[in-house]
Image: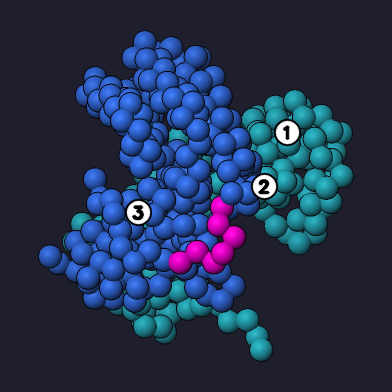
Amino acid sequence: MSVRVPLRQQAYEQIRDELLTRGPLAFGGRLAEEQLARRLAMSRTPVRDALRRLAVAGLVESAPGGGYLPRRPRPRDVREEYELRALLECRAAALAASRPREAADELERAEAEGRDFHLAVAHASGNEALARSIGTLRERALVHSLASSTSVHELERLREGHRAVRTAIRACDAPDAERRMAEHLALACELALAAVRTGREAA
Amino acid sequence: MTAASLADAAYERLRTALVHGEIEPGAAVVEAEVAGLLRMSRTPAREALLRLELEGYVQRDAAGRLVVHPPTAREIAETFMVRQLLEGHAIRLAASRISDAELSSLVELIRLDQRALRRRRVDELAGINDRIHTAILVASRNRTLSELVSSLRARIYGLNAFVVGSQSDQQRFVADHAEMVRCLRDGDDEAAVALVHDHLARARDLLLAGLDGLGAAEPSFPRRLRVSAA
């Protein structure tokens, strides 16, 4: 028997992916239960469940007059989220560096499978509660980073940051892993803030 | 009452029951039983359960049943490490951001905490503890931070109320709470962070020690609820 993904989970993932790729412009800027149900060829119940979950996850917010809007982060939200990411992800990097063998394996696997670097470091920490919290923050932060256009040069700087963190973890240097993660997130925050400002001006 | 406010009422009632330990970790929570217990139809009961599931209070097991999450020792240790980071950060922010009105209501909560301790009302302590920690999070003015901590706490709530500790443990927790509020009043953020760190370490050790004492039999959903929602 194949494992069936519940409809509400399918609905959640499909809507989330669209939000992450298209940002505030996804779904014509407004998410209505009935239209989404038609579009995903599902009944309204799983779509309603999915929208609730997306609201809890901070990807959409309920709109005056019904339905939901893709969340448009304010600069303050971005700063708050990155402040929390730094708090948790620097600890994750330090923990990963203190269990280098497991961490190196985990990071390599993630790389091979093309998984997200930050989630890989979170899992490499060996603390599931920490990884779950980082995952929640990461999902929120993706809305405003992916929807923006980052230049090739900036992308390279971000990748360089990943390499520095990875090297520190492999070298079992916890303080350095923590410091490199902090530097990398400070840069990512700066870029996200710029993107949010541009997005607001364009809107 | 409208369907939405019925669902809200059901949610508050169930959450309160969980916080007060009226529903044991490991117990299955069935829509029909909840509806029967709260004397309402299944639709609002279902809405309430969905919200509790989203917030992490109940989870689906392999058979698809909703169950009050029974945390393992490892999960407790990991959860408290993250809570120390996040709630330490929250009280640091709160020390500079808390309003006079918020401070007054915390002072009032401390009074209730001390009264419950004096009167040996162990059943009230869990609810008051919940309100004190929540008030500090709200005063941090960082909604994401509050939500992250809520979802971490949701997974250990049931257990929290079951493991009440000795009277001297309770005295210590109540004294910690009063000291946190004093630090907030004086804007002493360094002391507040250190205190939250130690307070959560004590809570963690108590839960870990109490984990073995939990019922070995399959816990069942209660037939009636004692505490009403605040």
Residue A38 position within the rendered picture, expressed as x and y whole percent measured from the top left: 36, 82
| Residue A76 seen by the camera | no
> What is the display colour for chain A?
cyan
Which corner quadrant of the image does residue B182 belong to? Answer: top left
Quick check: B183 above or below A34?
A: above
How much space separates mark 3 and mark 1, taking CA atoms?
39 Å
Identity of the residue furthest to the bottom in this view: A1
Q: Which residue is drawn at 20% across and 64% down?
A: B6
From the viewer's perspective, is the residue at label 3 or at label 1 nearer?
3
- The kind of secondary structure the magenta stretch mainly shows is loop
How much space separates mark 1 and mark 2, taking CA atoms?
19 Å
Which chain is mark 3 on?
Answer: B
Callout 1 crowding tier (Cα within 10 Å): few <14, some 14–19, many ≥20 = many
Residue contact at pointers 1 and 2, CB within 8 angstroms:
no
- Magenta residues span B214-220
Is circle 1 on the same chain as circle 2?
no
